[in-house]
Image: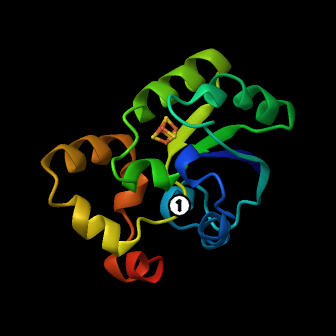
Amino acid sequence: MKKIGIIICGRYQNCGGGKCLRALKERAGGFSVYPPEEEVELVGYTNCGGCPGGNVEYVPHEMIRNGAEVIHLATGMVVGYPPCPRIKAFKDFIESRYGVRVVVGTHPIPLKYYTEHQKLSFWSKAMYELAPELFKDNEDVMRDYN
Ligand code: SF4
C-alpha cells in the first residue's frame, strides 16, 4: 500500500481531478511508478496556492500527517502555458524539507499539449529530465487524455 498526495497548479484550482484519478486507476503517466498490483491511496489533493506557490511550503506536512509517502506534482505544471518555472524548486524543496519522494507528473500529457510543446525548444529537454514517466505513454494513450 502506498499513500500519496497530489499538488496541482493554482491556475487550475477548480479542476475536479478527473484525469488524475483516472490515471491513478490506470497506472498511467506519473502513476506508472506504481505496479498494477500495488494498492495506492490518495490522502491529499490541493493546489499550489497560485504563483509563486506558497502552499508548497506547508501542504506536504499535512499530507505526510495523513501518511503520504510520495507527493506528485500535477501534469498541468508541465504542460500549462507557460509551464511552471518552479517545478524543480518545488521538487527539491519538498524532498529536502520533508524527506519524501516527489514525482513530477500525474495523468498522461494530453496529445494536443504534447504536440504544441514539442515546438518549444526550451520545453522538451528540461521536462524529459524532470518528468521522465510522462514521456513513456504512447500517443494513443496521450490522445485518450485530450
Ligand atoms: S505556474 Fe507554478 S507557481 Fe504558478 S500557479 Fe502554477 S504551479 Fe503554482
- Taking the view exactly as shown, the residue that stands out farthest to the top is 97
Rendering coords of residue 104 (x, y %): 48, 45
The part of the image, by quadrant, that contains residue 55 is top right
Picture quadrant where residue 34 is located:
bottom right
Q: Residue at x 39, y 69 (%)?
A: 137
In this view of the protein, can residue 134 be seen by the observer?
Answer: yes
Tell me which amino acid carries mark 1: Ser
- In the image shown, does 139 or 74 lie closer to the viewer? 74
Q: Is residue 130 left or right of residue 49?
A: left
Task: Point out residue 33 in the picture as x, y percentages from the top left corner.
Answer: 54, 54
| Relative image position of residue 107 (x, y in whole percent) | 53, 63
The scheme the figure's colours follow is rainbow
Q: What's the residue at 73%, 31% (across, down)?
A: 59
Note whether 51 is above or below 72 in the view shown.
above
- Can residue 9 be seen here? The reply is no
Residue at which label 1 appears: 32
Q: Is residue 91 above or below residue 19?
A: above
Crowdedness near tag 1: few (<14), some (14–19) or many (≥20) residues, C-alpha within 10 Å:
many
Position of the C terminus, as image quadrant, is bottom left
Q: Is residue 89 above or below residue 106?
A: above
Left/right placement of residue 143 relative to residue 15 reads left
Q: Position of residue 40 (x, y in %)?
A: 74, 57
Total numbered labels: 1
In this view, which residue lies farthest toward the right? 66
Nearest the eye: 59 or 135: 59
**Does dot 1 land on a helix, a strand or a loop?**
helix
Residue at image coords 71%, 37%? 69
Q: Residue at x 53, y 49 (%)?
A: 11
